[in-house]
Amino acid sequence: MRNHIVGCPHCGRQVLDHMTECPHCGGELKPSGYRPMDAKKLKIVKAVCYSVGAAVAVGLAVFLLFFRK
């Protein structure tokens, strides 16, 4: 864990190297070795997750409607 601790350039306190904002001072950090997912890809992933979730919910509703005793 010690390998992933760096100093905040704004306040000097210790933070993890993957953070994008300092939890102590709120300063912006540039994470090393980590890049947030781009907005277009994130939108696609969210759409797929919502679609799969909706399909499961509809399937469960149909199952309960027709096979409930």
Image (cartoon, rainbow, N blue to C red):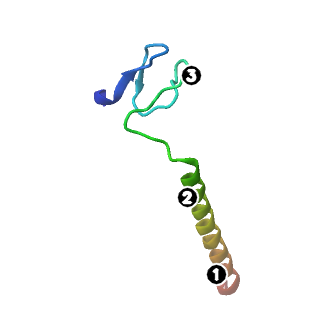
Identify the image quadrant of residue 8.
top left
Of callouts 3 and 2, the N-terminal one: 3
Q: Is residue 1 above or below residue 41?
A: above
Q: Which of marks 3 and 1 is nearer the N terminus?
A: 3
Residue 1 percent location from the top left of the image = 31, 31
The image shows residue 54 at horizontal and vertical percentages of 65, 68
Hey, what amino acid is under mark 1?
Answer: Phe
Q: What element carries label 3?
A: loop
Q: Is residue 50 above or below residue 20?
A: below
Q: What element carries label 1?
A: helix
Crowd rating for badge 3 (residues with CA inside 10 Å; few <14, some 14–19, many 20+): few
| Left or right placement of residue 38 versus residue 47 in this view | left
Quadrant including the C terminus = bottom right
Dot 2 crowding, Cα within 10 Å, few <14, some 14–19, many 20+: few
Q: Distance between the residues labelled 3 and 2?
A: 28 Å
At x 54%, y 21%, the residue is 27
- Say what amino acid the circle numbered 2 marks: Val
Q: Residue at x 49, y 42 (%)?
A: 36
Residue that carries the numbered disc 2 in the rendered image: 45
| Earlier sequence position, callout 2 versus callout 1 | 2
Which of 15/36 is in front? 36
> Residue reaching furthest left?
3
Cβ–Cβ under 8 Å for marks 3 and 1: no
State whether residue 19 is above or below residue 46.
above
- The residue singled out by tag 1 in the image is 63
Residue 11 pos. (x, y %): 48, 13
Q: Residue 26 carries which label?
A: 3
Horizontal side of residue 34 vs 64, given as left or right: left
Task: State the CA–CA distance, disc 2 to disc 1.
Answer: 27 Å
Give percent across and percent down for residue 50. Answer: 62, 62
